[in-house]
Amino acid sequence: MMEVAGADAHHLHHVMRTKIGERLLVADGAGGSAEAEVAGFAGGKVQLRLVQRLEEAAESLAEIELFQCLPKGDRMDFIVQKATELGVTRIRPLLSQNVVVRYDEKKAQARRERWQKIAAEAAKQCGRARIPEVAPAALLPSVLAAQASDKAALRLFFYEAEKQRDLRTVLRGSAVQRIFMLVGPEGGFAPEEAQHAAAHGFVAVTLGQRILRVDTAAIVAISLVQYEKGDLGFAKSSIDDLGVQGQSV
């Protein structure tokens, strides 16, 4: 027997108006998922009975980490939501030279909690079994240095000054499924930042001849990587074939 509490229980009972016997897809946020049946309601909680564990979930073969320099306004909310829907495993907010946004410690923590909540809600909406971690915002040079020891990843950064090396060629030339994607802020990367990224193993690629907004660039880049390396556009998984009704929790 499983129990769902808090806001999720309220949503299931009072918003979705689930009935006893109704079947749901449930996920633990760390990659595990199952088909479950509503068994009862008590003390503000929803009780679920396990029907079957699922071996396959809505997770991509590609393990994508998004290194995103912070944009202005609320665009990071949108990026976190859509990156989660597109299957990224981790989101690392970055502070680079051209980032306008600057948070004090209290506001930085509040923003991180907000982005993590957005990621959790987006993961539930799209049926994912894993909730991406949103890391604390950190300075670009320190993050580049910290990830340098991970030899198994393909590192890409999307650089407006790169005119020749395109993303598709780089992706098709590598068998690596673990991919780090570095996206700049408004104003792009300073030349010394591009040099620093290259020195730490990031390969500069272009997304084409048009200049894209920050949020557009992030979503387009993730979509292209998922199409080439992940599951975007591929056949349905066994979870889809179950015909399970209801919402993931």
Image: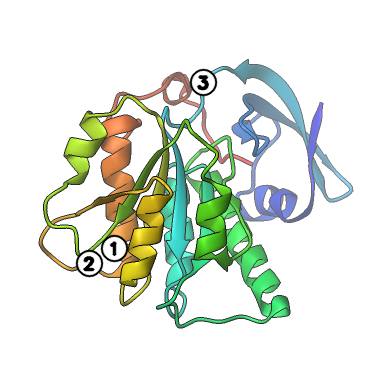
Q: Is residue 76 above or below residue 21?
A: below
Residue sitting at x 55%, y 56%: 143
Q: Are marks 1 and 2 in contact (CB under 8 Å)?
A: yes
Find the distance from the CA under tag 1 to the CA under tag 2.
6 Å
Q: Are marks 1 and 3 in contact (CB under 8 Å)?
A: no
Q: Return the x and y of residue 204 as percentages of the image width and height.
A: 27, 52
Q: Amino acid at mark 3?
A: Glu
Q: Specify which label sits upstream in the sequence, 1 or 3.
A: 3
User: Which quadrant of the view contains residue 124?
Assistant: top right
Q: Return the x and y of residue 21 as percentages of the image width and height.
A: 67, 28
Residue sitting at x 19%, y 39%: 168
Q: Is residue 15 above or below residue 63?
A: below
- Numbered circle sitting on residue 56: 3
**Mark 1: few/some/many CA within 10 Å (<14, 14-19, 20+):** few
Q: Is residue 135 visible?
A: yes
In the rendered image, the quadrant that contains the N terminus is top right
- Nearer the observer, disc 1 or disc 3? 1
Is label 2 in a helix, a strand or a loop? loop
Q: Amino acid at mark 2?
A: Leu
Q: Return the x and y of residue 190 as percentages of the image width and height.
A: 34, 72
Identify the residue position indicated by label 1 in the image.
216
Q: Is residue 184 visible?
A: no
Compare residues 188 and 1 and report the one nearer the observer: 188
Residue sitting at x 75%, y 25%: 49
Identify the residue position indicated by label 2 in the image.
212
